[in-house]
Amino acid sequence: MTTWTAPFIAADADAAFGSAPILRREFTLDAGHGAVTAATLDVSALGVVEAWLGGTRVSDHLLQPGWTSYEWRIRVVSHDVTEHLTAAPGSAAVLALVLGRGWAAGRLAWGGGGGWYTDERAGFAELHVTFADGHEQTLATDTDWQALPSPITDDQLYDGQDVDARVDDTTWKHPGQVQHAAGVHTVSIGDRELVDDTVPPVRPLAEIAPVDVWTSPSGATLVDFGVNLVGWVRVTASGPAGTVLTLRHAEVLEHDELGTRPLRTANATDHFTLSGSGADAPDVFEPRFTFHGFRYAEVDGWPGSLDDLRAAVTAVQVGSDLTRTGRFTSSQELLNTFHENVVRGMQGNFLSVPTDCPQRDERLGWTGDIAAFAPTASYLFDTRAFLGDWLRDVWLEQQHADGVIPFVVPDVLKYSPAEDFGVPDATAIWSDAGVWVPWTLYQAYGDTAVLEEQFDSMTAHLRRIRDHLSPQGLWDTVFQFGDWLDPDAPPEDAAKAKADPGVVATVCAFRSATLVAEAGALLPGHEAETSEAREMATSLQAAFREHYVTDGRIRSDCTTVYALAIVFGILSDEDTRAAGDRLAELAAESGYRISTGFAGTPFITDALTQTGHLDDAYRLLLQTECPSWLYPVTMGATTVWERWDSMLPDGTINPGEMTSFNHYALGAVADWMHRVVGGLAPLTPGYETVLVAPQPGGGLTWAETSLDTVHGHVAVRWELVDGELLVRVTVPEGVTAVVRLPGLAEQQLAGGTHELRAPAAVPVP
């Protein structure tokens, strides 16, 4: 681990500036040692920082150093800046830091407060320069730096950014005298640990041109970018000095106007004041210290025509730059669009931390969402570093909360209490993320290191559950989210689900205990914890069967309780068969419309498949009437919604206060699509042995899926042709594929590309 010695510094006149301050240091490159051969800049901030060296931005990284549990650790981001030091030795150069509020100093959560981690923005930098003869020069933040105001007059992640181009004095980027300079002072970070940044940076992922610009019935100027994205709008404009352009953002339209009610208190509005420099040198505005979740923007104050506006605006999509690994497509276009929506929603919500939504006054690392979605996420993208780092904050928060894995990580709700949920304590699915996510990473990448690193967290969670079990051995004594957002729950009470919360919690506790036991068995020196987890799983299973299962029926007799009980393996073989049959009956009674929330949705298609009801699973998957996975697609959705009916069939927004059009949790069924529809699953962790077992249905005539595993590229494509199932499999060298196709004996394939034929097990359209 790197050791740093420089202090954090803040502007003396920070409050007086009313802006994102610039911290600046002019320096001279040491002479007499030859040319610069290497230079590294390490930066960090309480807030977010944009570094400049030699007159240009150091990188395209955004919102660095990202959001961690700042009370205990802050990332330091390292950049190779050799190319930015082109001046000759002996000449002057400028290193500068522009500081935004970000998560540390800005407002967070829906309570209206902010600055939970610091009351002033502070920056940190260490520049290490190496010359041809081996000489090293170091420049670091200290009290010799200057501070001055920037043209950014306000910035908040929720509310937007204000920029006044009239005061954009760019002389600060270059050597020489600057105006309005003030001093700086050091800021103590206390016992916080500075850690090397190991996660993919937030950066621009795409640029998207508008698909339409028009005037609404109220006279507002609206821009449609065609997809729901996360980022901002870059504007190029010229006009009279002092002209203010106002851009407000929203995900949807309602009554042909911008639908801003789901934003709650988030203003999601940027203000740009023109410099008046003229058409030959137009102002370019790009608000990099905020982000919005939006498809539409309302523009006020535009000085030109609608055609001019169309040419002047570009949406910049941003997110953590994870490597894409998994893909899926099929003969069903609505299903393909849904899968694209899952991908786009993940990209928008994997922004420094795995958030619930990117648009309203929330954007928090809700643990329940990622507990449900982690298998899908780890197929679509390489999440090892991203989620592995987030899990370190899970354990830090847990250690400072008596073993409780909080509702959100980093846990800002301890400063802005979630009063709706009472006193936070361990809760099923949400707190279970501390077990389920590391297990998912182990399954996806085959590395036990994540289990070793998180094992204390995993066992601490189990013990917290144990402390709250009832005398009957059930987890039914504390607040539970339960089957959150059951479609039958009223809009104003998302926790009022059909599924008994004790049933949901107890079966989830059983799953966590089972996984901790399996993890412990893989790690040396954890025999006692492994035995403890096994005993707890056995006890939970016995209590569940005794108190919740009667003649094959599970208390509350709804789809979620059967789905969880089947997939988690808590039932006897006889009761599993009965539960599968009952689940299929309930699916049919619902008209194959979805009747599960956060708890049951990731598992219901697996539960049906495992108990011989594949056709019912496909009918659920391909349903287009509300509530269903494909209903939002028919309504024009380009991301996965928070509610099954975030937008009602008449085009109005769900009346609930909590309504988002970009939540990934309900897209967790994509994991089943990859494994069952596409036919690709791991038989051993990390895909060293893969299962190829596509199960066609639902009228699909072909599907294909692929994954870049740690061992290489694996791909499966199947097609129904003339009464046969044709399968093409690509296997990397050193990997074994076990193939299970209807009517054929199990086969093992080595590296290479293989084509197989089997009798079609379903009617061929």
Image (spheres, rainbow, N blue to C red):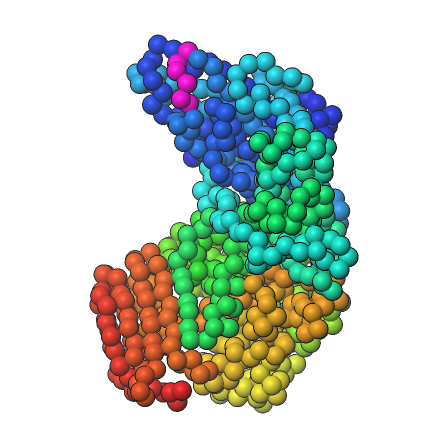
Please say if 316 is above or below 487.
above
Tell me if residue 319 is in the magenta stretch: no
Residue 453 visible in the displayed image: no
Q: Quadrant of residue 678?
A: bottom left
Pick the residue in front: 74 or 660. Answer: 660
Identify which residue is drawn at 23% across, 61% down: 733
Pick the residue in front: 466 or 91. Answer: 91
Identify which residue is drawn at 33% across, 70% down: 716
Q: Which residues are magenta?
A: 85-90
Residue sitting farthest toward the top: 32
Return the x and y of residue 660 as percentages of the image width and height: 65, 61
Identify which residue is drawn at 60% across, 34% down: 279
Return the x and y of residue 679 as percentages of the image width and height: 37, 73
Figure disc tally? 0
Does 754 sit left or right of 84 as displayed?
Answer: left
Q: Quadrant of residue 548?
A: bottom right
Pick the residue in front: 165 or 122. Answer: 165
Residue 716 visible in the displayed image: yes
Return the x and y of residue 149 as percentages of the image width and height: 66, 25
Please say if 699 is above or below 382.
below
Q: Quadrant of the N terminus?
A: top left
Pick the residue in front: 754 or 453. Answer: 754
Identify which residue is drawn at 52% across, 30% down: 51
Return the x and y of residue 117 as percentages of the image width and height: 66, 38
